[in-house]
Image (tube, rainbow, N blue to C red):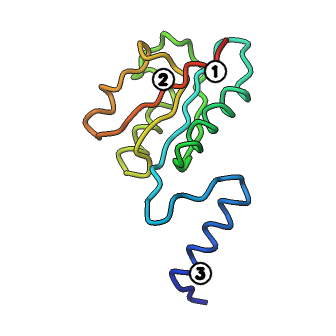
């Protein structure tokens, strides 16, 4: 069965609503983002991911992937096992940015600069 554009849009909005995603402002395309967390040893990742997701959804960004790299914060970007997935999503233009709890000194926006992607840091998630 071939669906019209209106039917496809309606189904997409229904799917988003079923998982709690707020519909975007009409006429605007939502930016895709990757949620990227790097929990400290013994830290529960659930609250951090909920905070990152809430931050992204408050800005009407679409979460395209959720990645949790369990490496020390001092690990360079080039040595983080899941960072290549972030780079792949951005290079393929499936995501335009990263929402993370990792401090600025650990992941610099230089690594995303040539793709014109952004990094949004949510630092208040850790007490």
Pointer 3: residues within 10 angstroms few (<14), some, or many (20+)?
A: few
**Is residue 38 or residue 20 the one in the foreground?**
20
Determine the residue located farthest toward the bottom in the rendered image: 1
Q: In the image, residue 35 lies at what x, y percent?
A: 56, 36
Residue at disc 3, secondary structure: helix
Counting residues from the start of the chain, the first of labels 3 and 1 encountered is: 3
User: What residue is rendered at 47% in x and 54% in y?
Assistant: 30
Counting residues from the start of the chain, the first of labels 2 and 1 encountered is: 2
User: What residue is rendered at 56% in x and 73% in y?
Assistant: 9
- For marks 2 and 1, give the CA distance: 21 Å
Pointer 1: residues within 10 angstroms few (<14), some, or many (20+)?
A: some
- Do the residues under discs 3 and 2 have CB atoms within 8 angstroms? no
User: What residue is rendered at 47% in x and 39% in y?
Assistant: 85
Pointer 2: residues within 10 angstroms few (<14), some, or many (20+)?
A: some
Quarter of the image where the N terminus is located: bottom right
Q: In the image, residue 108 lies at what x, y percent?
A: 37, 21
User: What residue is rendered at 60% in x and 19% in y?
Assistant: 124
30 relative position to 10: left or right: left
- For marks 3 and 2, give the CA distance: 41 Å
Q: Which residue is mark 1?
A: 125
Residue at disc 1, secondary structure: helix
**Is residue 121 or residue 93 the one in the foreground?**
121
Counting residues from the start of the chain, the first of labels 3 and 2 encountered is: 3
Marker disc for residue 7: 3
Q: In the image, residue 119 lies at what x, y percent?
A: 42, 31
From the viewer's perspective, is residue 39 above or below residue 83?
above
Say which of marks 3 and 2 sits in front.
3
Residue at disc 2, secondary structure: loop
């Amino acid at each position: 069965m071939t669906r019209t554009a209106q039917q496809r849009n309606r189904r997409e909005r229904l799917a988003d609503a079923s998982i709690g995603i707020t519909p975007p402002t009409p006429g605007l395309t939502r930016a895709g983002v990757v949620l990227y967390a790097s929990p400290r040893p013994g830290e529960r990742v659930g609250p951090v991911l909920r905070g990152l997701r809430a931050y992204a959804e408050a800005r009407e960004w679409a979460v395209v992937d959720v990645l949790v790299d369990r490496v020390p914060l001092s690990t360079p970007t080039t040595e983080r096992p899941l960072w290549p997935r972030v780079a792949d999503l951005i290079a393929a233009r499936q995501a335009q940015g990263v929402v993370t709890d990792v401090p600025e000194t650990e992941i610099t926006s230089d690594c995303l600069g040539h793709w014109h992607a952004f990094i949004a840091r949510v630092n208040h998630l850790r007490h």
